[in-house]
Image: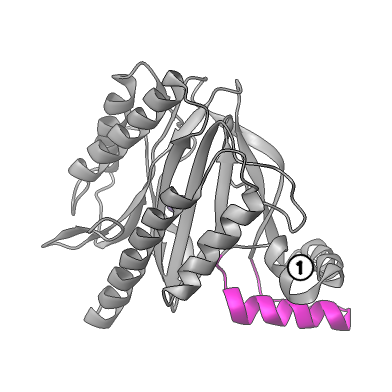
Amino acid sequence: MNSEEVEKIKQAGEIARQVVVYAKEVVKSGMLLLEVVNKIEDKIVELGAKPAFPVNLSVNEIAAHCTPSFNDSEVAFGLLKVDIGVHIKGYVADTAFSLDLEDSDENKRLIEAAEAGLKAGLEKIGYGVKLGEIGKNVQEAISSYGFSPIQNLSGHEIKQYDLHAGLNIPNYDNKSDIELDEGLYAVEPFATNGSGKVRDGKPSGIYHLIKESNVRDNFAREVLKFIVEEYDSLPFCSRWIYKKFGSRGLLALRQIEQAGVLHQYPQLVEVNRGKVAQAEHSVLITKEVKIVTTNV
Ligand code: MN
Ligand code: MN
């Protein structure tokens, strides 16, 4: 990674940090989720970056991959995860926090456990550290609260225009001897009072490009061209396509998906419908330094 790339990663991280401060002030119980995402995504643009993925707002037993549709009427409540991505020319910052919107002691403890898991993971992570050791640290921190980490969700390596690249950072002791290399990583533990696993739920309306291919319909081709130019292989959502192309865009999106060009993420739901809290930071690792880019 050259110094220009590092600079962009740091800039994206600083903007993400500011957006999180803003988001924590904005979100209130009973607010439309649609209003929340619009405010946060507008703030990212106002600060000179772009969303690296649609702001994810996932409530209670939904762990991740939930964003409002263009006409969504859901409101914020319960244990809310706010997951925010920022990018500058494909250099990404990925960060998340959780809020208790119903004054529940259980929610508050789950949030503390996820934050403690994140802290433990960030303390352990570094060049040459074995992945299993990072996971072990995260797991011990969350377990000390009497909760479980979600084992089939993990942190991940991040590369330019590639949100989930290469290595996964486990949230439990998976015994992996693989040693961490230099790079940008997201550490993101999830704490739950459920079983510690998620399953696929409903379609999320969040997509990403899996191959550059053609579609027959002219208008769908226009929409696909926009997706490639605007998002590259970063995730985007039907709400954004509606904003640009209206309801015709949603039909085109379905055609493009059916042509096998897009992958649609399913929502991820705790298998026992346990409540889930999440915490996340991005961290830049080199042989010499470790910089938590979203929390400098
Ligand atoms: Mn995230
Ligand atoms: Mn992430």
| Residue 295 position (above or below residue 216) | above
Q: Position of residue 192 (x, y in %)?
A: 46, 25
Disc 1 residue lies near ligand 1 with CB under 8 A: no
Q: Position of residue 103 (x, y in %)?
A: 47, 25
| Residue 40 position (above or below residue 131) | below
Q: Is residue 75 left or right of residue 19?
A: right
Residue positioned 76% across, 68% down in the render: 242
Residue positioned 67% across, 52% down in the render: 68
Q: Secondary structure at mark 1?
A: helix
Task: Look at the image and tell me whether residue 67 can be seen.
Answer: no
Q: Is residue 17 left or right of residue 265?
A: left
Give the quadrant of residue 93. Answer: bottom left
The quadrant of the image that shows the C terminus is bottom left
Residue positioned 66% across, 42% down in the render: 75
Report the residue that reaches farthest toward the left.
288
Q: Which residue is mark 1?
A: 242
Give the quadrant of residue 211. Answer: bottom right
Q: Decide which of 283, 76 is in the foreground and name it.
A: 76
Q: Decide which of 32, 282 is in the foreground and name it.
A: 32
Quick one: label 1, few (<14), some, or many (20+) residues within 10 Å?
some
Q: Is residue 100 left or right of residue 249?
A: left
Task: Look at the image and tell me whether residue 104 can be seen.
Answer: yes
Q: How many marks?
A: 1
Q: Position of residue 11 (x, y in %)?
A: 31, 72
Give the color scheme: rainbow, by chain, secondary structure or one colour: one colour
Q: Which residues are magenta?
A: 210-234
The three-letter amino acid code for the residue at tag 1 is: Tyr
Residue positioned 87% across, 83% down in the render: 218
Residue 135 shown in magenta: no
